[in-house]
Structures are given as structure tokens and as C-alpha cells.
Image (cartoon, rainbow, N blue to C red):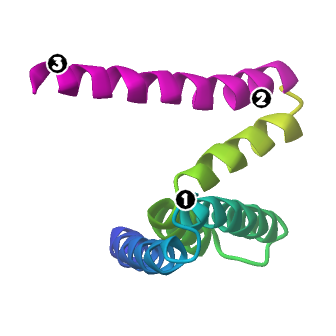
Amino acid sequence: MQLLWISLLGVAGILTRFGLDTWAGRLVPAFPVGTFAINVAGSALAGFLFTWSGQGRLAPAATTALLVGFCGGFTTFSAYSLQTLNLFEKGQTGWALAYFCLSPALGLMAAFAGASVAKGLG
């Protein structure tokens, strides 16, 4: 049953992301405002849900379905933000800073590498 809820909420997150990104893309074509807003909103939602769950206001199964399903479909950036926050809250400042800095830097380098490989094959 848990997998069903994760799947359904994942689809809802994906469709929400697609709709908002399509709509926002018309507002400022020169800047990815949709993705930017989705990443910020998804991070805020993930922080809220995680904290509410920690306070016992949300069942663990519902938390997993909402965080993994909806937030995961809506934006994976929310997982990055939440995992960084979690490391800071655990007092693992070094790991938090490494994760915070290396994830976007290496992700961007990997995107460039993947694009280079694709161009080389084309």
C-alpha cells in the first residue's frame, strides 16, 4: 500500500511541476523562473513536512509518501536541501558543507560531461 501512495503522490508531484513550470516559463522566458520557484517551494514544503513529522503531527507512512512521492516528483532539489539541513541538525557540519558545495558543483560538471559525450556521438 505504501508503494501505491508513493507512486500516486509522485505522479501528482510530476504533474504539478510540469504545470507550474509550463505556466511560469511564459512569464520570464529568459530565466528558468518555474524551476527556480519549484525548487524553493519544494524545499520549503519538505522542511515543513519533515519538521511536522518529527513533532508527531504526521504519521511516518504519510511523511514518506509525501516526501518521497510528492516532493520527489515535484523536485529532487528538496531532497538535497532537506538532507543538507539534516546533516547540519545532526552536528555534522563538515559533511553538510561538503554535500552542500559538492552536489551542485559536481552535478554541473557531470551535466557538461554528459553533454560533451552526447555531442561527440552526434
The local secondary structure at tag 1 comes to loop
Residue type indicated by callout 1:
Ala
- The reply to whether callout 3 and callout 2 are in contact (CB within 8 Å) is no
Of marks 1 and 3, the one in the foreground:
1
Q: Is residue 101 magenta?
A: yes
Q: Spatial distance from mark 3 to mark 2, Cα to Cα?
A: 36 Å
Q: Spatial distance from mark 2 to mark 1, Cα to Cα?
A: 32 Å
- Left or right: 2 as drawn, with respect to 40: left
Pointer 2 residue: 96
The local secondary structure at tag 2 comes to helix
Pointer 3 residue: 120
Quarter of the image for the C terminus: give it.
top left
- The reply to whether callout 2 and callout 1 are in contact (CB within 8 Å) is no
Magenta-highlighted residues = 93-122
Q: Earlier in the sequence, mark 2 or mark 1?
A: 1
Q: Earlier in the sequence, mark 3 or mark 2?
A: 2
Which residue does the image show at 29% across and 21% down from the upper left? 116
Residue type indicated by callout 2:
Ala
Magenta-colored segment: predominant secondary structure: helix
